[in-house]
Image (cartoon, rainbow, N blue to C red):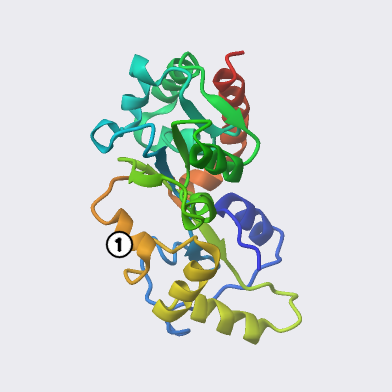
Amino acid sequence: MDFEDAASASDFNSKGFLNTVDWAALGIKTSPEMTPTNYLVAITAPYYVFYYNTNKVKDADVPKQMEDLLDPKWKGRLATWARPSGLEDFVAVWGEQQTIDYVKKLAAQKPHLYDSNFTVAQNVGSGTDDLAFTTYHTTLPTTQKGAPVKVATVNPTPLNVLYGYSLKYGANPAGGKLLLQWLASSKGAQVYEQVSGRGNPYVPETKTAQMLKGMKLATFSVDQEVKDSAHMTQLQGQLTKLLKGQ
């Protein structure tokens, strides 16, 4: 099953493809984060972490915040995704200009850029790169293979919430609602997290919620994401070029 960001799902809704749902009546614990609209329910949220090779980096030297990556000692030792989606999220807490300025400084550190976050994790595990800024769920295969690696949280934590919805013209709307109810429940969220590595930060029983407890989150509200969608797409293109030093 695929889930969508708020902007994409909002576009589907505006075209008349989605049902409105009484989430509380469906048995889902409602909140502004979990059920931000009558057609969206939060299901999962990839988030970013620092991932490091313990043979190359001492625990005491691991960055705690993004500004720490600008220390000269990390020049040429960093890895990250070539798409700056995690960096883009900092606009929510830093504002646009500060984010642009940061990406310029990060590019001066000569990070190694990869087309896949799974490749990022593999190269940290092999020691090709010492430290990465990458998505947590893509680190799991490398960690589970026994590589000398550890994860450290980033504060604020970039978070990309993905939502489920009920299709108006789906073959089985009732079954779809039942599946959404299960995925939003404690049991369903934990099972989905176990299978995918991606949890729901708004379901307290998930490992994701526990890992991010007390952390400031760099994420956009649904209203912001929908309103600024076109501009943020343009900004991501700009940040991509800046990250490459162009």
Q: Quarter holding the N terminus?
A: bottom right
Percent position (x, y) of residue 113?
59, 28
Instruction: Examine the rendering and report whether any part of residue 4 can be seen.
Output: yes
Residue 202 seen in the figure? no
Residue at position x 57%, y 73% in the image: 20
Q: Quadrant of the C terminus?
A: top right
Quadrant in the picture for residue 171: bottom right
Q: How many residues crowd mark 1 within 10 Å: few (<14), some (14–19), many (20+)?
A: few
The foreground one among 178 and 62 is: 62
Q: Quadrant of residue 203?
A: bottom left
Q: Residue 27 vs residue 246: left or right?
A: left
**Along the line of sight, the residue nearer the viewer: 126 or 242:** 126
- Residue 136 position, x and y percent, is 46, 50
Residue 3 x %, y %: 61, 62
- Residue 123: x %, y % from top left: 55, 37
Could you tell me which secondary element the residue under label 1 belongs to?
A: helix
Q: Residue at x 51, y 45 (%)?
A: 225
Residue 55 figure quarter:
top left
Q: Is residue 132 above or below residue 73?
A: below
